Amino acid sequence: MVWESQSSESEWSNNACLGYAILGAKKLGYDDEQIEDLVRAIYREFDFKTVDEAKDTYNQSSY
């Protein structure tokens, strides 16, 4: 039931991913240059890794 009501929110979006990264970086006190570096690094990975590969990386990490 919960997944059904959130289905549109659970769809993958590169822009949403980058938005989450920006929000998290701001909470950690990153400055604009650090956030820009982070966003660029993540953006580049979109070209080299699939969504499943990224998910596996997260699932196998200690984070």
Image: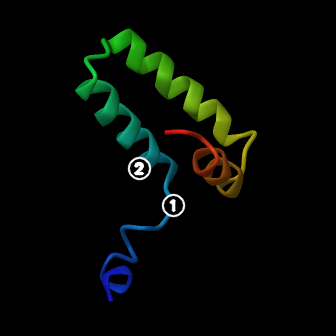
Amino acid type of the residue tagged 2 in the rendering:
Ala
In the picture shown, does residue 5 fall above or below 50?
A: below
Label 2: how many Cα within 10 Å (few below 14, some 14–19, many 20+): few
Q: Position of residue 59 (x, y in %)?
A: 59, 51
Task: Tell me if 36 is positioned left or right of 55 in this view.
Answer: left
Nearest the viewer among 6 and 44 is 6
Q: Which residue is pictured at 49% across the width and 39% down the height? A: 63
Amino acid type of the residue tagged 1 in the rendering:
Trp
Q: Position of residue 11 (x, y in %)?
A: 47, 67
How many numbered marks are there? 2
Nearest the viewer among 60 and 4 is 60
For label 2, the residue is 16
In the picture shown, does residue 53 fall above or below 30?
A: below
In the picture shown, does residue 28 fall above or below 53?
A: above
How are the colours assigned in the image?
Answer: rainbow
Task: Tell me if 38 is positioned left or right of 8 in this view.
Answer: right
Name the quadrant containing residue 51. Answer: bottom right
SS category of the residue bearing label 1: loop
SS category of the residue bearing label 2: helix
Label 1: how many Cα within 10 Å (few below 14, some 14–19, many 20+): few
Q: Which residue is pictured at 39% across the width and 20% down the height? A: 35
In the picture shown, does residue 38 fall above or below 58?
A: above
Q: Are marks 2 and 1 in contact (CB under 8 Å)?
A: yes
Task: Tell me if 10 is positioned left or right of 30 in this view.
Answer: right
Q: Residue furthest front?
A: 62
For label 1, the residue is 12
Q: CA distance from mark 2 to mark 1?
A: 8 Å
Name the quadrant containing residue 47. Answer: top right
Q: Which residue is pictured at 33% across the width and 89% down the height? A: 1
